[in-house]
Amino acid sequence: MAMERLDSETDSTPAAVPHWYDGDDDIPTIVDGEGVTVYDSEGTAYLDFQSQLYCVNAGHSNQQIIDAIADQLARIPYVSSGKHNDTRNELRERLLEVAPESMAQTLFSISGSEANETAVMLARAYADSSKVLTRWHSYHGATYGMASLTGDTDTRAYIEPHATTTGNAKFLPPIPEAFDAETPEELAEKAANHLEFVIRNEGPDTIAALLTEVVAGSSGAYTAPPGYFERVRELCDEYDILLIADEVITGFGRTGEWFGAQSEGIQPDLMTFAKGLTSSYVPLAGVMMNDDLAEYVAAEGFDVGQTFAGHPVGCAAALAAMDVYENGLLENTREVAPRLESRLTDLEERFDVVSSVHGRGLHWGVAFADPEDGEPFVDPRVSDEEDNPVETVLSTAGENGALFGMGRPNTQLIVSPPLCVTEDEIDQAVDALEDAIERTF
């Protein structure tokens, strides 16, 4: 059962409308947190194995980040995004030190959605083409522009009827469900061949960029088979298409490296980041770009802006968070990740309803399916049924004291703890999940 924290006060104040709201207000009110644990208004403790939204990479209440925020607030709390600032400039240099070698310049933003919007804006202007390729089964944000580029059906179905944007085309992700392949190598080849077909069919000259998650985020933590991204890079070079890596979730240690692109050994032309940059203590995001894009921006300028882009308080938080990652958390991720993988793989071996487990580092997906036919118990993309056992697993795990994320679509759960997690905490959380699966099925 969930742990209890003493001396808490129950908050009976009516709640604001939460995001991803479905009318059900039976959700916890989180009021406190430390490390991997958060507490609700009733004093109940939960192991936060979704890092709230796959973003509190340094854990909750890290004093080093908090102190950096306070110091910046005391010195100067805000500087226009149209002016230079010493903290902002220092963060730019620090990012270039740890980014893939192809990156040469940084343009700050506020959120992951806006960073992806900015990257697409730059790519279209530079290439003088409008079309952007993205994968089905992807998530890049919920603004009007990013909803059309996102492959997640729930997001697109809600937004696109009122504001479909032009210049987008989709291709299939390199996952077993999409291709008939017997080996990872065959899957990589078939998925890359399919991508080339889409490029040629759409017309290479009409395509500005290909935007992709390196490891799928909320869409399931799927990794690409070996050799896939190498071929993607080759296709982008052959057809003169910019490769944009969406590192909003995979950036800043989540996969065990600074960025997921480094885990795959690829050099993107543009790279977006957010979430883990500040451990989400303060909103901050941005786009990194290669030399050619940097020279283009220097020559042509960038005549748009966002008031809070590169906020100095966010930049101070980011510098402190990067110190925390560098001084132990990146190493901890690599040390404890095998434990998480092993425990989750055990679930796949024990329960026939767990159809697959996949991920990298401290970001994993656990998919469920009916063992009789291999299909999801309830697939929201094709069914209006409300009795989804995966949702029951999620809520039961919460009752057991562990919070996990619901994947897109909700046929899977996402397991993504803060990078400061210990092996004991991994065991406690997976035990809670294991019990929830057993009780549900």
Image (spheres, helix red, strand yellow):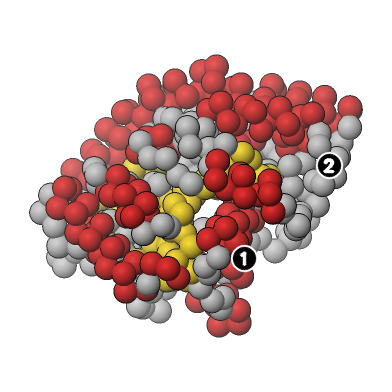
Towards the viewer: 134 or 364: 134
Say the numbered circle drawn on residue 83.
Answer: 2
Give the quarter of the figure containing the C terminus.
bottom left
Mark 1 neighbour class, 10 Å CA radius: few under 14, some 14 to 19, many 20 or more:
some
Towards the viewer: 360 or 169: 169
- Where's residue 91, x and y in %? 68, 30
Tell me the residue at 43%/57% (across/down): 241
- Where's residue 53, x and y in %? 55, 47
Look at mark 1 in the image and give the residue it sits on.
143
Q: Amino acid at mark 1?
A: Thr
Tell me the residue at 25%/57% (across/down): 192
Image-based side of 280 in relation to 333, left or right: right
Is residue 436 visible from the viewing direction of this image? no
Image-based side of 203 in relation to 353, left or right: right
Q: Amino acid at mark 2?
A: Lys
Give residue 165's quadrant in the image: bottom right
Furthest residue in direction left, as rendered: 182
Furthest residue in direction front, as rendered: 299
